[in-house]
Amino acid sequence: MVRRLAECAPATRIREVTILRPSLIAPQSPDELAATVQGRKVVGYARRAKNVLLHLDKGWTVRVQLGMTGHFFWIPDARQLPRFTRVWFGLPGGAAFVFEDSRTFGNVHVHRTEELPTVFAAYGPEPLDDGFTWQQLKASAARAKGPVKPFLLDQSKVVGLGNIWAAESLFAARIAPNRPLPGLSDPEWKALHKAIRKTLAAAIDNAFRVTASAEEFPEADLLACFVYGRTGDPCRRCQEPIARFVQAGRSTFHCTRCQH
């Protein structure tokens, strides 16, 4: 999403703010957000975990927390807003930034840019940062005793891994999703660290490639998944049918032969 924003609107200004679902702004007020953002120039785009960041002039940043179903994108014509638009930002020439969220799990806030480290203080490390090591990943699980997959979904341990890419990373590392964390060896932590980075990098590239336009976000079956959503299909390594079970309230997919 951030790549698309930078591609579609490398330099722009927010002319107006329309909030169609005020509850997504709380505890800030819609008027406060609109007054702060309106008229500001966008000076950069960034991401932290599952937050899209619009850096504005004068030291302000709009933070769009995507939640499970949120999308944030540029459209050329604000008269054609998608069905589940919750907040939109009018831009010069009639274009707009749109926050669309069918299940309204996300939110939109504005912060002083200098406050962002505090806002994200509870977040774990970014797995694609150069400083992210397998030792750091292992250390974050030092006091955890549960299975490995729910651990990967905990944004306070490592950020950015949703249900799909946690399952795919474990498949790439050949680690079963229900393995207890204390039982993982150093070679397995190394393999998992490598798999997370490789899986996420490929997922971002592939998602960008298959996105036909800025407002279209494909489902997992278009993103070359090895296990996610493939219950009963043959494993692409060994031909064993992919299995599914519910883990911490989420569907988990894995190969019972390849992952152990």
Image: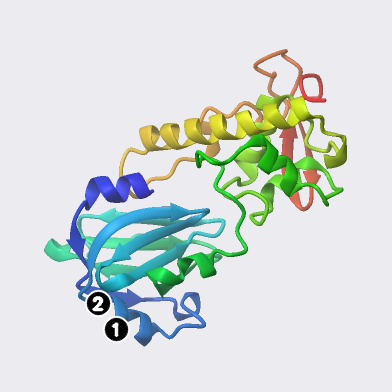
Q: Residue at x 22, y 53 (%)?
A: 9
> Which residue is nearer to you in this view: 77 or 145?
145
Q: Position of residue 234 (x, y in %)?
A: 69, 18
Residue at label 1? 35
Q: Are marks 2 and 1 in contact (CB under 8 Å)?
A: yes
Look at the numbered disc 1 and give the secondary structure of its residue.
Answer: helix
Q: Position of residue 112 (x, y in %)?
A: 39, 74
Q: CA distance from mark 2 to mark 1?
A: 6 Å
Q: Residues within 10 Å of mark 2 (few under 14, many from 20)?
A: some
Residue at label 2? 38
Q: In the rendered image of this protein, does residue 164 appear above or below residue 41?
A: above
Q: In the rendered image of this protein, does residue 187 appear above or below residue 6?
A: above
What amino acid type is highlighted by mark number 2? Gln
User: Would residue 247 appear left or right of 94 to someone viewing this image?
Assistant: right
Q: Position of residue 93 (x, y in %)?
A: 12, 62
> Which residue is nearer to you in this view: 189 or 246?
189
Residue 187 found in image quarter: top right
User: Would residue 212 appear left or right of 92 to someone viewing this image?
Assistant: right
Q: Position of residue 244 (x, y in %)?
A: 76, 35
> Which residue is nearer to you in this view: 69 or 113?
113
